[in-house]
Amino acid sequence: MSVGIAVMGLAIGILVGLTGVGGAALLTPLLILLGISPSIAVGTDFIYNAITKLFGLGQHWKQGTINFKLVKYLSVGSIPSAMVAIGTLHLFPIFHQHQEQIIKYALGYILTLVAVSFLIRIFFDKKIQPNRWQMQPLEQKKALTIVIGVIFGFIVGLTSIGSGSLFAIAMLFFYRMNTSELVGTDITHAFFLVTVAGILNASFGSVDYMLAANLLIGSIPGVLIGSKLSTKVSPKPLQVIIAIIILISGLRLI
């Protein structure tokens, strides 16, 4: 089983490196399909995600492609909101008794939303025209940024999905930055968010550490392989296929 999980991690890592599609959107529904409970799948994915995001954060830190002020404002909203979502599921009996069903159905809806957001990025990324929100300085959008963090942070806390994709779409529409800064800022914020969420899930016993380790054994070299291949392979057709797979996975969970 551990070899199979490592191979699965390798495959997901290659796809992430090739396409930039979030690993959580691929991994979490796949783990549930393999018979792992939704709560353990989500908790384990947080730990797995935090470690993989750390590698990306280090690279973007060296490149100077992180907007730390935007990371701070998003985190002010997203981290407490994710903690509320996780705490609600574990501390209130009425929710704790049905947490597997709640997580499963929430995953279905969020995966569907994430798939649509991927398709928007694929087909409309370069067609989005500057709008009044993008033209405003960040300080004038402080409240909006925190609210975005609150809304998407709760979703991430509930499902482990969206720490990259949903926030990236928000950055694309509301903030003016080049692609490398958007990616670096997105990865950095996601690292802080999923790390806190992972620690909180671990405190509730919702993490399978052996599962996370086996996934990382495969996915870390997989991301490196995929990143190298990305210069030789057009990612767009593969991105569309993966988005459709995520959409189907989401609809099946609803």
Image (tube, helix red, strand yellow):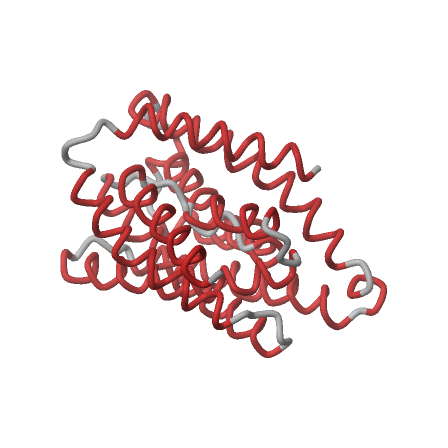
Outermost residue toward the bottom?
203
Q: Position of residue 216 (x, y in %)?
A: 36, 62
| Residue 126 as seen in the image, left or right of residue 229 | right
The answer to which of 70 and 159 lies nearer the viewer is 159
For the C terminus, give its image quadrant.
Answer: top right
Is 111 rendered above or below residue 5? above
Is 164 rendered above or below residue 126? below
The answer to which of 55 and 216 lies nearer the viewer is 216
Quarter holding residue 227: top left
Q: How many marks?
A: 0
Q: Position of residue 58 (x, y in %)?
A: 22, 64
| Residue 135 as seen in the image, left or right of residue 83 | left
Q: Position of residue 144 (x, y in %)?
A: 50, 47
Q: Residue at x 25, y 56 (%)?
A: 221
Quarter holding residue 217: bottom left
| Residue 128 as seen in the image, left or right of residue 154 | left
Q: Position of residue 225 (x, y in %)?
A: 21, 48
The answer to which of 171 and 115 lies nearer the viewer is 115
Q: Residue at x 31, y 53 (%)?
A: 185
Q: Residue at x 78, y 65 (%)?
A: 96
Q: Residue at x 82, y 64 (%)?
A: 97
